[in-house]
Every structure is written in structure tokens, then in C-alpha cells.
Image: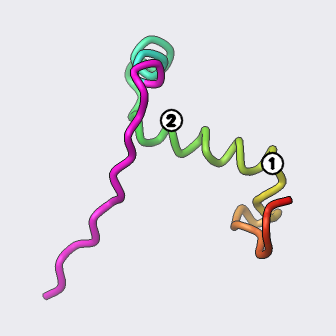
């Protein structure tokens, strides 16, 4: 049997914790942070239409 893959540790600021606690009460913090990352990457043009990262460098 293989060991389960560990999720990477992400450190958040006190401000981020406060926003998650106050604005997204009852939601799973990891889900909210994933949605935020997807929204930012989409807005920055880093994701393709299929939602996967585009190849190449960010300009």
C-alpha cells in the first residue's frame, strides 16, 4: 500500500482568516480559497476554456 499524498501546507494571513470567518461562515475554507484562486487565475488569463492552466509563461 502507498501512503496517501499530503496536501501542501498553505499559510494564510490573519486578515484572510478574518475574511473567511466573517464573510464565509459555514463554508469550508479550502473550498472558498480554491474558488478565489480559480477566479483570479481566470481573470489573469492563466486558465484555458477547459479550466486547466495554459501552457507557457505568464506575461
Determine crowd level at label 2: few under 14, some 14-19, many 20+ residues with C-alpha closer than 10 A.
few
- Establish if 46 lies above or below 13: below
In the rendered view, tell whether residue 59 sits above or below residue 19: below
Label 2 sits on a secondary structure element that is helix
Foreground mark, 1 or 2, reads: 1
Residue stretch rendered in magenta on the structure: 1-16
Left or right of 12 in this view: 34? right
Residue 54 got which mark? none
| Residue position marked by numbered label 2 in the rendering | 32
- Please give the label number shown on residue 44: 1
Query: SS for tag 1?
Result: loop
What type of secondary structure mainly makes up the magenta span?
A: loop
Q: Which residue is drawn at 71% across and 61% down?
A: 51
Asked if residue 50 lies left or right of residue 29, the reply is right
Q: Quadrant of the C terminus?
A: bottom right
**Residue at coordinates 77% horizontally, 49% vertically from top-left?**
42
Task: Please give the name of the residue rendered at 38% of the width and 40% of the height, measured from the top-left corner.
Answer: 11
Q: Which residue is drawn at 81% across and 44% down?
A: 43
- Scheme by which the image is coloured: rainbow
| Percent of width and height locating residue 23 | 50, 15
Asked if residue 15 is among those painted magenta in the image, a careful observer would answer: yes
Q: Please provide percent x and percent y for residue 58.
A: 80, 61
Q: Does the magenta stretch include residue 24?
A: no
1 or 2: tag closer to the N-terminus? 2
Q: Is residue 3 left or right of residue 56?
A: left
**The quadrant where residue 17 appears:** top left
**Crowding at label 1, few (<14), some or many (≥20) Cα neighbours within 10 Å?**
few
Amino acid at each position: 500500500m502507498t501512503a496517501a499524498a499530503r496536501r501542501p501546507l498553505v499559510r494564510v494571513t490573519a486578515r484572510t482568516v478574518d475574511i473567511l470567518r466573517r464573510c464565509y461562515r459555514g463554508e469550508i475554507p479550502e473550498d472558498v480559497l480554491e474558488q478565489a484562486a480559480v477566479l483570479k487565475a481566470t481573470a489573469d488569463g492563466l486558465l484555458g476554456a477547459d479550466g486547466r492552466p495554459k501552457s507557457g509563461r505568464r506575461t
